[in-house]
Amino acid sequence: MNVNLLPLDDAAILLGRVLRPAIGPSIIAIRDGTVIDITAKQAPTIRDVLELDDPAGYVRSAKGEELGPLSAIAEATLQETSAAQLLAPCDLQALKACGVTFARSMLERVIEERAGGDPARAEAIRTKVQSLVGDSLNNIEPGSPQAAQAKAALIEVGIWSQYLEVGIGPDAEVFTKSQPMSSVGWGARVGLHPMSSWNNPEPEIVLAVNSKGRICGASLGNDVNLRDVEGRSALLLGKAKDNNASCAIGPFIRLFDDRFSLDTICAAELDMTVEGKDGFRLAGKSSMREISRDPASLVSQTIGRHHQYPDGFILFLGTMFAPTQDRGVAGEGFTHHLGDIVTITAPEIGSLVNVVDLSTNCPEWTFGAADLMRNLAARNLL
């Protein structure tokens, strides 16, 4: 498995977490390939670091304890040993996600809905929808007069959908992906609900936003998706999205500074591979240049006078990746097999690697916010 976690920029300011045996979750910085524990009373959680006036400056200069080379901790994480292991680089933040933010994935959601979660019907519906719509939705600004005209035309031919509503309408889809403290990190297993037989990874950039709505940095995420469950009914979104180990974030949050900003994110290119034990290989891309909604607008639709987040939030920005390559049965497209290795890479942020398993086989989530508070209090960090 690929153990190259880091971005290409050696000067990147990286913030993360590890689980230290007999100690607990600790805040780390990465310097010259070495893991430094910078947990302190001033900022004992990721949430607290992001609330500072200058998170990047704090992480750059914070003193701490050397825990060893990142490569050794990465290997321990993969082996699920009792040594220090990487965790998702967030803690108390709400875990939110935006859906249907790219035209390509928007049409796939329409197809899922029309197919009723049945992959055998999806190919015929895909052909019909594409013949009617083609690429005509790619450059439409959501909520614009042009989008309203497209909506009227689609209703007239009978293919309007709730997914098109949030794809080109004025209001973005923002949902709760998972619960605070429940996400898994680099090297961990990601979980599929056993009820699902049609599912896929969703490679995304995630933004780290503090309680004031300030975007402080970015990481990578895998918004594991159960296409058959959501396709049966959009009201099953919670069951399709929020399961044990179904939310992967990592490897670190790269903090914004004069070398890395929201403009960098808006130009980012994500590569993803899925490598199966059966020799199957799938490669895909998601280009942030093709996102239909501005990331800053997605943040403002999430937080404001209408909704506050005292501990900040992590926001998945959506993906243009919607795999249609057959795996096995002709015409039924892609679905995961257990043991698949999913690698999501953006040169500016690093690589997120996870192995696919059932949610019922992944380690249970047992350490929540109350446990974190008790742990930090016992360490005299509160």
Image: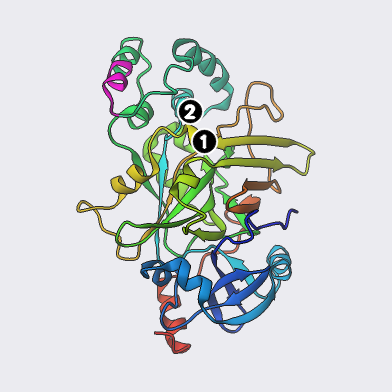
| Residue assigned mark 2 | 112
Identity of the residue furthest to the right in this view: 279
Q: Is residue 258 visible?
A: yes
For the N terminus, give its image quadrant.
Answer: bottom right
Residue 149: percent from left, percent from top: 29, 16
Around disc 1, counting alpha carbons within 10 Å, would you say few (fewer than 14), some (14 to 19), or many (20 or more)?
many
> Which residue is more in the foreground, 263 or 212?
263
Q: Which residue does the image show at 29% across and 45% down from the upper left?
A: 301
Q: Residue 7: x and y, percent?
A: 63, 55
Q: Nearer the viewer, residue 209 or 369?
A: 209
**In this picture, which residue range is highlighted in magenta?**
143-150
Numbered circles on residues, count: 2
CA gap, disc 2 and disc 1: 7 Å
Badge 1 marks a residue whose secondary structure is helix
Q: Are marks 2 and 1 in contact (CB under 8 Å)?
A: yes
Return the residue at label 1: 227
Q: Amino acid at mark 2?
A: Glu
Q: Quadrant of residue 146?
A: top left
How far across and how far down the image is residue 218, in percent?
49, 54
In front here: 253 or 154? 253
